[in-house]
């Protein structure tokens, strides 16, 4: 009997690879380290250049997963090791306890009575309980408990209200072994650590956020039907600066271009223009890199008064001395002058780096997987190089075909 | 099932607040009243082991084959409630009744009773489905175009064990990639230029069993449907193929240089990137060369998009110019240098060369001065106006897709693939780049979108995967994305068809061909099961086994209609299953309450709503009809392309009908939501119900 294909990573690429294979009649196992599928994209507010919500396509994909008997998926699943070789891999997976089992009906009673709140995090719903569900469109549609926050039996309130014996506060992690014929590595990307760019004072200033945090803040506002506010004092920001290539195209950090940040920042500015008319967004860039149809973003922006594109380099963010706002010291290249300017909120367009994988993979000098691996494993999408969603999905589909080859 | 046995059951779950909100006993009574002999069951947690065991025992004991399951949304507990050999229809009492309406209220109870009876009526009306599988299915695949995308596609498909036919109109394989002097570096570890390697790909392909290559060959015609396409080629007079799916990788051509005359094209000192690639292989390199990037691209007057490949191609040429003629000076005039990803290192290498000067700028004029070219450049970083002289100018002309009409599809809706912006046969969907409007036919490479060679390879493989998948789905009688796995298909009752051509014109996927007279010729394997043809047919002859004129009419009529004096309006809400339905569920999860006067019917797409259902609803006494679907427009989110748009158009026609019936046109409204807009959908419903209350009852109610 042929073993199934194991897909590591349940973001948009992993989900796509799993579905493409299953719908072509192949057995697959999909593992995701978080408690919900969707990965980075699942926490996005919208896509460029269409500005449509990712939840729309994800919902279609979740429906396809629900109705396809050839897909097995595990969430909270951490890859521990891979042994064996192509055709006969053996993967060890640690399943972290959700503390809520499959009996969960997503009725939400546990969250209603839960007294503990998860720590504040940009883009996380404020006041989210230790017993929580990702959002109203989460997959799987089941609650889980944050083990870091829950006080277990000391509280036990959720145990009392759950009518379905779904709460298992003493659950411990379990190990699962998976035999696989092929392995697709769809582990995606992490954001480069903004704290490493010291001149931008990310660690010191609450109102200096990363593009990923900003994306989640916007997504949270859409979901909760709330206004965008800045982290420091809850004010609605009216002047927002976007600094491009933070970490990227920088020999001291990421020497490569992260490919998505230009389009993402223009998308952010356009979203602000539509959702928060009157906001001024200024984007500081070296080159605006919008390939193919993404160029249309520029066209859309040229008609907007509230969006300013400045070819320029931000040297540093000055320490705020009781002043309102964040002070940028910058060089406006096209106007050939230096400038100091104050903004309510600063978004750092951070670059992407590869997420680590517990498997023996040949990497390039930047830590991304080489496209062809001696072990026969198939790296896909952002595990190979930074790319946008559409290209990632395309590559995941191509990788699915590689997994069908003997 | 229509003729066979029909033994129905209703199982009601009283868990998750359903029992606390509703009188389940009364609900069961009302269901039995409308359906004599109905097998009933109630459980406090149907999805639990005990609930499921009880349910299965009962169903077996009573020989039930159709089950109405009143519990949570069909979007949850779907595995638990897939019961072998039983047709299950879910009644969403949790998210769409108990969680959004006042508990223990008469109107909430009536809503639950109606929604239950509606689904029971549907179960009674649906037919047994026999999946459509073409009589003769081929697993072979046709690839059109022997460039990098087509070659890779053929190679990867053959490696997966599928027989591939590769058709190339010229006398050799390789396309543009085959005429290149040097390739871009891999960039992953090494930034030096590579020798062309496409011939290796060709060699490998020629070695593989199961690959048939046709050079100097064009497609004469393609007819049929996925799994069963008939291909005629003009090879050796003519030859016929039978394939299951098609990849079209017919590539691109450079932008029409005649339109670039202001940039000096026409002078022999001015070349395009493609011409220069050949030039360096034959002629000595002059001492001063100037590259103009974005020649025709990113320009509303020419090509509005970025052609993606030209920045790195020009940088590559600048590098080999310097290799071939170390005395050469190179100028590069750019707007933005777009070397994304790892190509950045390569860009740095070019920058490091002292004899390569790069500046941002806009070309004002290009003049041949006899002894060389003179360029006036503005908005440069050096100065407002700069004059540069050069022996040769290389224009990085943009990428224009070749036409796909060469496929010669014998389809009612045209010979090629539908194009979106800028003539590319791309998908409109970010998450679904291989969404095609011609099922079983997938575009790959530069005919789909501007891209470089590496991306073309990935794209060729991806399109081949979709082609293989289309064949495998047809073998099982299943639809492909987005209704993957759907075994139902539109069946036509031809005796009543009047050849009005609505279905053949409105099908977004070109499923229907037609005879000269205009009679539809269905190709069910091309169908994506959106039901737009069901909505389009004025004679009501098109239907799916589980979604047809009768099944929806039965649901509409199953609602018990209070008379006008009770002041209880009834609002019919057609909800698109794709985005609006999940948004409504999310409203439930957030307990965002809305009016208990609504009665909800999910539809495959707004475009699948047939006019007769509107008149059925009005004559049955509904006070208003609200249709909620995905956003239309340039950036449409409708999963079936123009379903929402069609509904808007049909709505305009309906308004006239309403006026002639002396009914207020506001009674029928179409609204659009995004999937994340659960707050908006709540407001939408409540505002609409309020508006209907102001208008007053439907005068046809008591007739």
Image (cartoon, coloured by chain):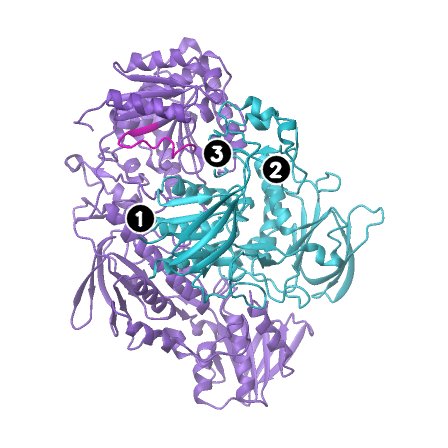
Chain colours: A cyan, B purple
Q: Is residue A320 above or below residue B41?
A: below
- Badge 2 sits on which subunit? A
- Number of other residues with Cα within 10 Å of mark 2, as a class: few under 14, some 14 to 19, many 20 or more: some
Q: Which mark is residue A147?
A: 2
- Is residue A91 one of those drawn in magenta? no
> In percent of the image, x 64 and y 55: which residue is there?
A349
Say which of marks 2 and 3 sits in front. 2
- Number of other residues with Cα within 10 Å of mark 1, as a class: few under 14, some 14 to 19, many 20 or more: many
> Horizontal and vertical percent for residue A329?
78, 59
Q: Which residues are magenta?
A: B76-89
> Horizontal and vertical percent for residue B638?
41, 42
Q: Identify the main secondary structure in magenta.
A: loop
Q: Name the secondary structure under disc 2.
A: loop
Q: Name the secondary structure under disc 1.
A: loop
Query: How far apart are the alpha carbons under marks 2 and 3?
Result: 30 Å
Q: Is residue B305 above or below residue B591?
A: below
Camera-nearest residue between A198 and B490: A198
* Snapshot quadrant of residue B422: bottom left
Camera-nearest residue between B146 and B473: B473
Query: If the image is split into quadrants, where does the C terminus of chain A sit?
Result: bottom left
What residue would you read off at disc 1?
Answer: B509
Q: Name the secondary structure under disc 3.
A: helix
Say which of marks 1 and 2 sits in front. 2
What residue would you read off at disc 3?
Answer: B583
> In percent of the image, x 33 and y 15: which residue is there?
B31
**Relative horizontal placement of residue B298, taking residue A1 as reference (left or right):** right
- Badge 1 sits on which subunit? B
Q: On the same chain: label 2 and label 3?
A: no
> In percent of the image, x 55 and y 81: which residue is there?
B319
- On the question of residue B622 being in view, the answer is no
């Amino acid at each position: 009997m042929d073993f199934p294909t194991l897909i590591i990573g349940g973001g948009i690429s992993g989900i796509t690879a799993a579905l493409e294979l299953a719908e072509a009649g192949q057995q697959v196992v999909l593992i995701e380290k978080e408690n919900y599928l969707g990965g980075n994209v699942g926490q996005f507010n919208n896509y460029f250049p269409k500005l449509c919500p990712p939840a729309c396509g994800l919902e279609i994909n979740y429906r396809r997963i629900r109705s396809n008997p050839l897909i097995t998926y595990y969430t909270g699943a951490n890859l521990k090791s891979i042994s064996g070789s192509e055709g006969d891999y053996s993967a060890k997976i640690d399943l972290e306890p959700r503390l809520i089992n499959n009996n969960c009906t997503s009725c939400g009673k546990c969250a209603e009575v839960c007294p503990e709140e998860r720590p504040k995090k940009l883009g996380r719903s404020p006041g989210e309980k230790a017993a929580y569900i990702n959002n109203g469109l989460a997959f799987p549609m089941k609650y889980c408990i944050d083990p870091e926050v829950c006080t277990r039996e000391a509280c036990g309130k959720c145990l009392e209200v759950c009518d379905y014996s779904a709460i298992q506060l003493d659950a411990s992690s379990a190990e699962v072994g998976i035999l696989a014929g092929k392995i697709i590595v769809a582990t995606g990307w992490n954001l480069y650590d903004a704290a490493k760019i010291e001149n931008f004072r990310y660690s010191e200033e609450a109102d200096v956020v990363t593009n990923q945090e900003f994306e989640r803040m916007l997504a949270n506002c859409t979901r909760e039907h709330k206004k965008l506010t800045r982290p420091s004092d809850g004010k609605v920001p009216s002047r927002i600066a976007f600094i491009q290539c933070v970490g990227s195209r920088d020999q001291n950090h990421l020497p490569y271009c992260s490919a998505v940040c230009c389009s993402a920042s223009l998308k952010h500015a356009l979203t602000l223009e539509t959702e928060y008319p009157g906001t001024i967004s200024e984007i500081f860039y070296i080159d605006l890199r919008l390939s193919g149809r993404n160029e249309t973003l520029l066209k859309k922006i040229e008609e907007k008064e509230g969006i300013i594109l400045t070819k320029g380099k931000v040297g540093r963010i000055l320490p705020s001395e009781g002043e309102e706002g964040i002070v940028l010291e910058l060089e406006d290249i096209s106007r050939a002058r230096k400038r100091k300017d104050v903004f309510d909120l600063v978004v750092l367009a951070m670059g992407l780096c590869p997420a680590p994988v517990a498997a023996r993979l040949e990497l390039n000098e930047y830590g991304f997987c080489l496209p062809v691996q001696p072990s026969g494993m198939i790296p896909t999408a952002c595990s190979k190089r930074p790319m946008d969603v559409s290209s990632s999905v395309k590559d995941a589909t191509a990788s699915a075909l590689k997994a069908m080859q003997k | 099932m229509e003729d066979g046995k029909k033994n129905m059951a209703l199982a009601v779950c009283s868990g998750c607040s359903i029992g606390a909100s509703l009188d389940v006993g009364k609900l069961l009574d009302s269901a039995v009243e409308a359906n004599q002999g109905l097998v009933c069951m109630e459980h406090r947690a149907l999805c639990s082991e005990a609930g499921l065991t009880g349910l299965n025992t009962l169903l077996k004991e009573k020989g039930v084959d159709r089950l109405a399951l009143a519990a949570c949304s069909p979007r949850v507990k779907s595995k638990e409630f897939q019961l072998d050999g039983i047709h299950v229809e879910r009644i969403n009492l949790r998210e769409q009744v108990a969680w959004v309406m006042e508990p223990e209220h008469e109107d909430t109870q009536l809503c639950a009773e109606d929604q239950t009876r509606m689904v029971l009526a549907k179960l009674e009306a649906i037919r047994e489905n026999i999946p459509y599988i073409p009589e003769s299915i081929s697993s072979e695949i046709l690839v059109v175009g022997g460039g990098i995308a087509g070659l890779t596609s053929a190679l990867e498909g053959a490696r997966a064990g599928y027989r591939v036919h590769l058709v190339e109109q010229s006398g050799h394989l390789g396309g543009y990639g085959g005429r290149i002097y040097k390739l871009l570096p891999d960039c992953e570890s090494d930034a030096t230029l590579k020798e062309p390697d496409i011939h290796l790909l060709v060699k490998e392909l020629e070695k593989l069993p199961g690959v048939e290559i046709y050079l100097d060959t064009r497609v004469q015609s393609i007819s049929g449907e996925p799994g069963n396409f008939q291909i005629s080629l003009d090879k050796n007079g003519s030859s016929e193929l039978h394939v299951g799916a098609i990849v079209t990788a017919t590539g691109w051509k450079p932008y029409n240089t005649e339109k670039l005359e202001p940039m000096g094209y026409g002078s022999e000192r001015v070349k395009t990137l493609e011409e220069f690639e050949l030039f360096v292989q034959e002629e000595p390199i002059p001492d001063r060369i100037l590259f103009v990037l974005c020649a025709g691209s990113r320009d509303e007057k020419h090509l509005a998009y970025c052609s993606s490949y030209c920045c790195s191609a020009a940088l590559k040429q600048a590098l080999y110019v310097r290799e071939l003629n170390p005395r050469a000076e190179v100028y590069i005039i750019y707007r933005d240098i777009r070397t994304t990803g790892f190509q950045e290192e390569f860009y740095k290498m070019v920058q490091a060369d002292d004899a390569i000067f790069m500046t941002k700028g806009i070309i004002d004029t290009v003049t041949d001065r006899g002894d060389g070219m003179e360029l006036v450049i503005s908005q440069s970083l050096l100065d407002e106006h700069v004059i540069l002289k050069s022996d040769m100018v290389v224009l990085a002309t943009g990428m224009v897709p070749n036409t796909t009409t060469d496929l010669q599809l014998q389809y009612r809706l045209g010979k090629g693939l539908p194009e979106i912006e800028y003539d590319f046969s791309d998908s409109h969907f970010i998450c679904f780049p291989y969404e095609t409007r011609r099922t079983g036919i997938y575009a790959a490479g530069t005919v789909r979108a501007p891209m470089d060679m590496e991306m073309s390879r990935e794209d060729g493989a991806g399109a081949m995967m979709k082609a293989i998948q289309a064949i495998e789905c047809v073998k099982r009688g299943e639809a492909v994305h987005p209704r993957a796995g759907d075994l139902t298909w539109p069946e036509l009752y031809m005796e009543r068809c009047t050849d009005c051509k609505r279905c053949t014109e409105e099908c977004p996927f070109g499923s229907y061909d037609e005879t000269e007279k205009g009679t539809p010729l269905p190709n069910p394997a091309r169908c994506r099961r959106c039901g737009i043809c069901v909505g389009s047919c004025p004679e009501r002859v098109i239907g799916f086994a589980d979604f047809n004129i009768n099944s929806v009419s039965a649901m509409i009529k199953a609602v018990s209609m209070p008379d006008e004096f009770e002041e209880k309006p009834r609002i019919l809400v057609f909800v698109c299953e794709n985005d609006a339905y999940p948004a409504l569920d999310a409203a439930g999860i957030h307990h965002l309450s809305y009016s208990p006067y609504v009665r909800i019917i999910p539809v495959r797409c707004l475009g699948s709503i047939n006019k007769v259902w509107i008149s059925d609803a009005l004559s049955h006494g509904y006070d208003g009809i609200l249709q909620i679907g995905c956003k239309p427009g340039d950036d449409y989110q409708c999963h079936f392309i123009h379903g929402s748009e069609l509904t808007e158009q049909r709505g305009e026609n309906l308004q006239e009908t309403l006026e002639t019936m002396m009914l207020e046109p506001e009674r029928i409204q179409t609204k659009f939501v995004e999937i994340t807009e659960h707050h908006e959908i709540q407001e939408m419903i409540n505002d609409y119900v309020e508006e209907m209350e102001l208008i007053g009852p439907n005068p046809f109610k008591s007739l």
